[in-house]
Image (cartoon, rainbow, N blue to C red):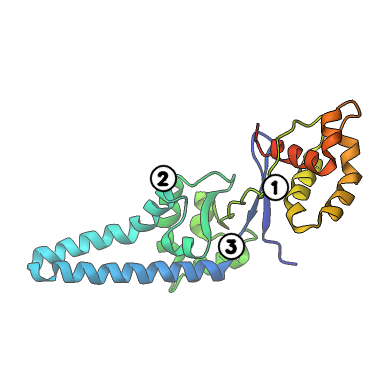
Amino acid sequence: MLDTLRVIETPEGVHILLRLAGPVPRALAWLLDLLLRIAIYALLGMMFGWMGSFGIWLFLTLSFFLEWFYPVLFEVYADGATPGKRAFGLTVLHDDGVPVGWSGSMVRNLLRAVDFLPFLYAFGLCALLLNRDFKRLGDLVARTVVVYREKPKKAPQLPPGQPLPLPVRLSSTEQQLIVSFAARIPRMTPERAEELAQILGPALVPADNRRERAQGNVPALIGYARHLLGER
């Protein structure tokens, strides 16, 4: 089966999951950027057309810089994404998952001239289809990869409550379970919430902590969840 997920391990030992972008979304992003550049060329032509030979020189100069530095500037200053890539949720990163820099972006975009050969990015398309990471020639040389941008996750909305520090040490999975349960409480009846909370609550609420025992398992779990999310 086609696998488009890559796991990158940082020097700090953190694993980053990258979802690679295939040729179709990349081609659509390129087409959108092309249409945007054509619109800018038309605007520049109307602005400088009446200036004669100087206007033609100015138009060609600006068109040259626009053609070659348009993607570079966006990739370096706009989180690795041109307007076309951003519209399709794509971004350019280095192989190790760090944002693309000047040298990497310059190399991958200057080599578009080679990827375009012999016509319509034939070399680049062949490289994409033959490479497991969907890299064109420019990406291979610059050691870059095009991936889908991960949408930031919103913090779960928890019921009101007093943040409580965890009385015992829990794993990250167990902590996530508490936060997930607390976020689902508003969608439950009070009886069902207390029934589920009794499974986990007694194991967390110390027997000598009368205040939390008196409040019940549900308020205690809400307090633990709010503390895990950074409330103090």
Residue 46, quarter of picture? bottom left
Q: Residue at x 47, y 52 (%)?
A: 80
The answer to whether one can see residue 101 in this image is yes
How packed mark 1 is, by other alpha carbons closer than 10 Å (few <14, some 14-19, many 20 or more), is: some
Check disc 3 and report its element: helix, strand or loop. Answer: loop
How packed mark 2 is, by other alpha carbons closer than 10 Å (few <14, some 14-19, many 20 or more), is: few
The residue where tag 2 is placed is 102
The residue where tag 1 is placed is 159
How packed mark 3 is, by other alpha carbons closer than 10 Å (few <14, some 14-19, many 20 or more), is: many
The C terminus is located in which quarter? Answer: top right
State the mark number for residue 67.
none
Direction from residue 137 to residue 207 in the image, left or right: right
Residue 224 location, x and y as percent?
A: 76, 37
Q: Nearer the viewer, residue 160 or 28?
A: 160
The residue where tag 3 is placed is 21
Direction from residue 14 to residue 202 in the image, left or right: right
Name which residue type carries label 3: Ala
Label located before the other in sequence (3 or 1): 3
